[in-house]
């Protein structure tokens, strides 16, 4: 295939052009200059892009799972919702790259430069982070860190202060993060889980609420579950036991009140919908806009399992 034929080809699709040039996308672009190129949404799984220049390249939604990106230049690249699971980015440059909601699970990020990177909502669970540079300059609101090599206790606390959700990296003890300190972190946008002694069912409730409403409002939901936990045994469980007994399964809906920071929880026994009246509780937390619906008809039923002991 001649260069003229490629130039005159009626396509801008990178994969089609590579095919016209008899190039193997997964092997022949290591060290290539692909800067300022549109590669959004392509399937580049397992491709070898060692030392490739992706500066200002659009990789939004691109599948780069298991790709080799060692020493790649991804400065100012767009990697929103990109799949980088199990990819090797050792010593890559990610300065000012946009990785919002990207999947970086189990990726090798050792030695990566994260200066001014946007990791909002990204998942770095099990990613290797040894010898990284400028990670604290990255935006990490609702970013998930879990079981990462290369993160110390003090470093993890800084990430939490900046809004990250850190789980399992270090065995925090209850006295190391007090309830008041955790609430302050949540007010600053952090998503903290496991630092307080949540009962198992409350942890599941939090997961169910986040699954329904999205991780973007995780801080609000965490604060709500904290407030619910504070009054559960005294003001709620006793009422529910009196009404329904020690049942293992109850149904609940949650909706916003007219006052900021006010949430209503309505609970009932699904076995006796017509014979036993539901119980409604008001839960108060710091005044803030609620992501919960304001009408019961728009609500979502949550199952509460083993909430009464």
Image (cartoon, rainbow, N blue to C red):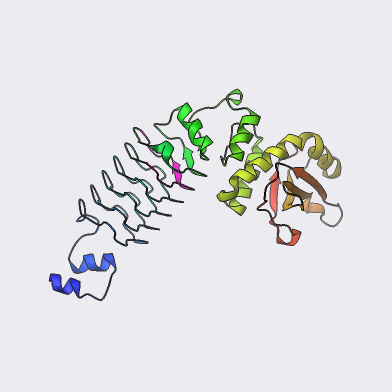
Splitting the image into 4 quarters, where does residue 203 fall?
A: top right
Q: Is residue 249 left or right of residue 80?
A: right
Asked if one can make out residue 10 in the rendered structure from this viewpoint, the answer is yes
Pick the residue in front: 60 or 47: 60
Residue 292 placed where, x, y %? Answer: 68, 53
Q: Is residue 249 left or right of residue 32?
A: right
Q: Is residue 124 left or right of residue 25?
A: right
Asked if one can make out residue 1 in the rendered structure from this viewpoint, the answer is no
Residue 121 part of the magenta-drawn span? yes
Q: Residue at x 34, y 61 (%)?
A: 42
Q: Tell me the quarter of the image containing the C terminus.
A: top right
User: How many numbered marks, from 0 up?
Assistant: 0
The relative height of residue 237 versus residue 290 in the rendered view (above or below) is: above
Which SS type dominates the magenta stretch? loop
Residue 128 part of the magenta-drawn span? yes
Q: Which residues are magenta?
A: 114-130
Residue 204 placed where, x, y %? Answer: 63, 43
Pick the residue in front: 160 or 272: 160
Residue 148 placed where, x, y %? Answer: 42, 35
Q: Residue at x 83, y 45 (%)?
A: 244
Q: Tell me the quarter of the image containing the N terminus.
A: bottom left
Q: Residue at x 80, y 40 (%)?
A: 236
Splitting the image into 4 quarters, where does residue 4 fall?
A: bottom left
Name the residue furthest top.
Answer: 175
Q: Is residue 268 left or right of residue 224?
A: right
Residue 88 placed where, x, y %? Answer: 31, 44
């Amino acid at each position: 295939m001649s260069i003229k034929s490629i130039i005159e080809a009626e396509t801008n699709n990178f994969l089609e052009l590579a095919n016209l040039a008899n190039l193997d996308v997964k092997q022949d672009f290591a060290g290539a200059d692909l800067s300022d190129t549109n590669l959004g949404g392509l399937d580049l799984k397992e491709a070898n892009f060692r030392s490739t220049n992706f500066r200002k390249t659009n990789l939004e939604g691109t599948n780069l799972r298991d790709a080799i990106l060692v020493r790649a230049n991804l400065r100012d690249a767009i990697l929103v919702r990109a799949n980088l699971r199990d990819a090797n980015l050792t010593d890559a440059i990610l300065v000012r790259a946009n990785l919002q909601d990207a999947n970086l699970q189990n990726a090798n990020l050792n030695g990566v430069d994260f200066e001014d990177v946007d990791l909002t909502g990204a998942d770095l669970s099990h990613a290797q982070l040894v010898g990284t540079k400028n990670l604290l300059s990255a935006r990490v609101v609702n970013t998930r860190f879990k079981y990462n090599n290369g993160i110390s206790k003090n470093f993890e606390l800084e990430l939490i202060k900046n809004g990250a959700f850190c789980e399992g990296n270090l065995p925090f003890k209850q006295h190391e993060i007090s309830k008041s300190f955790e609430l302050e972190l949540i007010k600053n946008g952090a998503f903290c889980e496991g630092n307080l002694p949540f009962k198992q069912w409350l942890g599941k409730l939090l997961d169910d609420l986040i699954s329904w409403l999205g991780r973007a409002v995780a801080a609000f939901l965490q604060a709500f579950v904290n407030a619910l936990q504070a009054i559960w045994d005294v003001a709620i469980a006793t009422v529910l036991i009196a009404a329904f007994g020690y049942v293992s399964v109850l149904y609940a809906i949650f909706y916003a009140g007219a006052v900021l920071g006010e949430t209503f929880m309505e609970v009932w026994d699904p076995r006796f919908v017509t014979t036993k009246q539901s119980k409604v509780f008001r839960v108060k937390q710091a005044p803030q806009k609620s992501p919960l619906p304001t009408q019961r008809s728009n609500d979502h039923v949550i199952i509460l399992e083993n909430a009464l002991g």
